[in-house]
Amino acid sequence: MHVKTLCLGVLSHGPASGYEIRKAFEDGPFSYFQEAGFGSIYPALKRLVEQGSVTFEEQPQDSRPDKKVYRITPAGRQALFDAVNGPVGEDKYRSDFLFVLYFARLLGPRHLDRLIGQRIDRLKAALAELSPTVTSPTAGSRFVCEFGRVMFEAEIAFLESRRHEMVGALIQSEVAD
């Protein structure tokens, strides 16, 4: 998904600064399925303004540069509509955790067990944060929240049921060495 489309999606919920758009991808509703950093958000907003999809208003701030607050235009709403009605690209799943587990043979059993435990704890915390949002206002947002809840629960169950296999395999390889 192009960052311009992601910005339009955030702005479809109401006016926002670049910082607030970034927060939507950092710890807001979009944090579970897309990433967008300042280095891609601000150029995208610039292009959206040039295309007439977004306008902005500068708000003065004490001892700081003026803050730009962006608003989606009717042309921006049409661009968002066109984008979400177009073909959907393949999902890309990236995980530092899975990369580390791929090389579990380089870890000690205690370290691996601790990593898996930490992952389970983070998933449970994310699940607790996600659960209240299941009362989201639209059918689409409720569906996505429920999908996320099911995915987190499945990952927790998988890690809890297979944790001993991974750690046990490392213990066995230590004994064999």
Image (cartoon, helix red, strand yellow):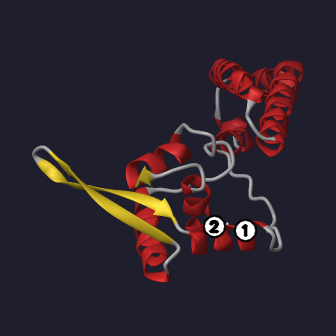
Look at label 2 and name its amino acid: Arg
Q: Give the image location of residue 122, x and y in percent.
A: 64, 24
Nearer-the-camera pick, 76 or 114: 76
Left or right: 53, with 135 as reference point: left
Please say whether residue 46 is visible from this viewpoint: yes
Residue underneath mark 2: 77
The residue at 57%/53% (across/down) is 10
Q: Give the image location of residue 44, x and y in percent.
A: 47, 70
Left or right: 38, with 65 as reference point: right
Q: Quadrant of residue 165?
A: top right
Q: Give the image location of residue 144, x and y in percent.
A: 80, 41
Left or right: 131, with 62 as reference point: right
Rate crowding at label 2 as few (under 14), some (14 to 19) or many (20 or more) other CA atoms within 10 Å.
some
Look at label 1 and name its amino acid: Phe
Please say whether residue 177 is visible from this viewpoint: no
Q: Secondary structure at mark 1?
A: helix
Q: Secondary structure at mark 2?
A: helix
How far apart are the alpha carbons under marks 2 and 1? Answer: 6 Å
Q: Is residue 29 above or below residue 73?
A: above
On the rendered image, what quadrant is the N terminus found in? Answer: bottom right
Nearer-the-camera pick, 114 or 77: 77
Q: Is residue 83 above or below residue 115?
A: below
On the rendered image, what quadrant is the C terminus found in? Answer: top right
Q: Quadrant of residue 29?
A: top right
Q: Residue furthest left?
A: 63
The residue at 74%/22% (across/down) is 131
Residue underneath mark 1: 81
Rate crowding at label 1 as few (under 14), some (14 to 19) or many (20 or more) other CA atoms within 10 Å.
some
